[in-house]
Image (cartoon, rainbow, N blue to C red):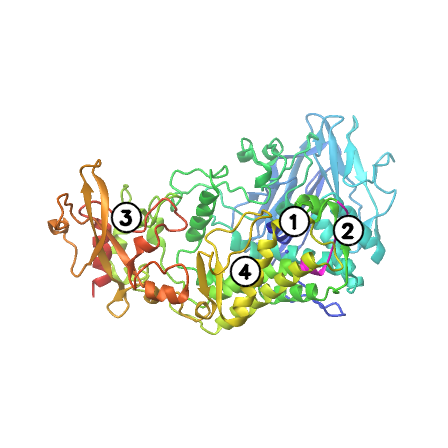
Amino acid sequence: MTRIVALLAALLILSTCENVVTPLAVNPRTTYSIRVFPAPEHGSLTLSAFRAMQGDVVTVYVNPDPGYVLKDQGLIAQPEVDGNPSGVPLSGGKYQLTVTQYNVAVTAAFVPKTTGFTVSVDRELVHGKVSVFPQNAAAGTPVRIVLIPDAGYDLEAGTLRLDDGTPVSETVPYMLSLPARDVTVSARFAEQDYTGLLAAAGKYLDVGEYDTAASFYKEAYKKNNAAPETIFYSTFAELGALLIDPDVRALMSLPARYDNSFNPPSTLDGWICDDDWQANGGGVWYGTWPGVSGDTTSLALTNPAYASVVYSTEDATLPNIHLRGSNFVTPFGDFDISTKPATTQKFYNVLFWSLIASNTGGFNGLVEKVNRYLFGDQFEAIAARAAAFPADGRVLLNPRLKARFGLADFYGDADTYVGKAELDYVFANLRAVKALFEYLSVYDLTIDLRPALTTEIHVDDGLDQILHFIFNQAGSNDTHKAYWKTPAEVANILPFKNNFLNVRNAAVMNNAKTDLSSALTLANAAFTSWYDGGTTTAFTADAKASRRWVRDGIAAAKAALDSGGVFYFPKELPPSLPSSQWVTSDTADYGLSVSRFFTPGAFSLSTLFTTEWGGRAPSLFKLEWYEDRANSYAAVFTGNYTLVTEPIPTRDGGQNVNGTVNSAPYGIYSFEVNTAYLKELFPKGFNGYGDKELLSTVFKTIPLWPKRPTYFIGGAANLTARQLYYYYHWR
């Protein structure tokens, strides 16, 4: 099912389900002008937009005159306020300018060619643009011609030709074998009716020109907003527009303070990343995200950093992050992630640390922005459009999309008709994510993360390593130690001393529960259609058998939410095999009390942990242990632990474990979990523990760092535990 959801992530935005076309809401952000000035000699520039907002990406179409080429680094953007000119980068065969907080003038320098032949574009084009790549090459080189029609227009048949009248094949993708001379390409664009718009949309979708196809589907919807095909495909087109919205892209971007900042694609083509053409005709993808070909020749054409990176099919829907920590912070240490991390776990750890580095003051702002920009009014308008899809409607699934997202695994190889079930499932997943962020907004996520970023933290470090680095800098940079000398600032990072995970907005909990209920209702309806028949093509027998556990799990979650009962689930999801079944109350690893889960404060730290000083400090405990000298001095934990009631001396007072032959000083510490409460929240899963248990006993690992225990180690002195106790209990 994840590939069906990938269909959504690959495309994403807004509109309405009403019988009239409703204008999009005006974004109140400041817009800036982009203009061509001064006009270049021996060539021309065309812009995809003349006004844009900060973060928008404007494509600059470069068109040298015959016999001329763009000078190396010759495309320049000059802010019209104090600022240095900068080059406009080439990405995926396009020059793309990211708008900053200034009006900007773009110009170019063209110089005579020194080799090969040139491809130019007729300057008199109207109602559309033409882009060619490459613009200078040897005779016989395949040149791709990309048409960008204005809204409602498409190529007029028989008009794509060279300056001498030679016709260019009008089979998409438009390709030209460069003759042994300089050439100019011309075309005419004609306005299309509803039928023409649909035909054009399908034509471009067939060859993976997703942005162009999306524009045609949106125009077709304006002419007929009741037809199933236009509702279905324009819904994904609008979702795609939301995904590449500057505000949404900003949420996913990594900070520019890194050597190579990460910017999500600004086009649907960049997200779906299956463009299979390059300059030498070798049949590989080029751009900033990995595709499915496994070849990197064309990546090196536009970004040398990718020259040695080889991708596999599994990488197709994941971003490639080329990133190293800079002088500001080094949360990745020496771990070079310009290539894919060795494990999926490390990949997510990298993303986790990137998120930390981008939100040093906590995550309230991030959660609020996700709720506002990604799941705001625009998202609800798109969801309303999808909901208007007729129950008995059916749409032929485009074969390229079916192949790109591996949907034959679900539907088989025959022609596949899709409809309401697919839309329901996509929006079920989206609404579940919305519910998650609404749930997060119930809690206060303010916490000062700067000390965690003043040192080297590696992707597989555990809680004990992180705290050790924060308190006891091992390297030469001691700037954080001044931070720890200020109690007021220390209070901002220690969770029990600040408001971290306290209830911030209890009223939002009802929204989270409502949206999750809607998500489960939609998902349940989708599976009912796929399994029990309907107007669209049902799953194949193999798909039904191997994914029945998904259907049953969703039904169980919906029943538990509706009744306020217990939802039972396993530690790990079952594999997609015919023998797999969803767990029962007897076979489940955990059971979650739904009513408790949706009670504000269910995950407050003072509720989960044993605390003192009015809930402002966690109780700290010494673990009883000894060295088994008969077994290579292996550490043996007796299971007993003692409350720390006074500051920990430098050498821990020389306390030894009493009553044992193999005694050892206390040097390991942990917090205590209120397992009596966990048994209420999780009626199954914590029954083997008493009312209170050590954190290191109940949660043996921190999920992000599976290698590391959740207690603090550091030898007899254990500076980390000593510092923690000191700061938590210092009045």
Q: Nearer the viewer, residue 94 or 123?
A: 94
Give the SS element for disc 4.
helix
- Give the amino acid at mark 1: Ala
Secondary structure type for disc 3: helix
- Which mark, by number, is residue 433? 4
Q: Is residue 103 visible?
A: no
Q: Is residue 160 above or below residue 603?
A: above
Of badges 1 and 4, the one in the foreground is 1
Q: Nearer the viewer, residue 414 or 285?
A: 414
* Residue type beneath disc 2: Ala
Q: Position of residue 383 (x, y in %)?
A: 65, 64
Residue 639: percent from left, percent from top: 24, 53
Q: CA distance from mark 4 to mark 2?
A: 30 Å
Report how far apart the C-alphas of labels 1 and 4 lie in the structure. Answer: 25 Å
Point out residue 56 in the picture as x, y percentages from the top left corner.
60, 54
Task: Say few, some or many: other residues with alpha carbon within 10 Å of mark 4 (under 14 / 14 to 19 / 20 or more).
Answer: some
Which quarter shows the C terminus? Answer: bottom left
Secondary structure under tag 1 reads helix
Q: Which mark is residue 468?
A: 3
Kindly report the distance in space between the C-alpha atoms of the residues bearing marks 2 and 1: 30 Å
Looking at the rendered structure, the kind of residue marked 4 is Val
Amino acid type at mark 3: His
Q: Which residue is mark 2?
A: 201
Residue 439 lies in the magenta stretch: no
Q: Residues within 10 Å of mark 1 (few under 14, many from 20)?
A: many
Which span of residues is magenta-colored? 414-423
Q: In the image, which disc is placed on residue 543?
A: 1
* Of pointers 2 and 3, the one earlier in the residue sequence: 2
Mark 2 or mark 1: name the one nearer the start of the chain: 2
| Mark 2 crowdedness (10 Å alpha carbons): few <14, some 14-19, many ≥20 | many
- Contact between labelled residues 4 and 1, with CB atoms less than 8 Å apart: no
Instruction: Name the disc covering residue 90, or none.
Output: none
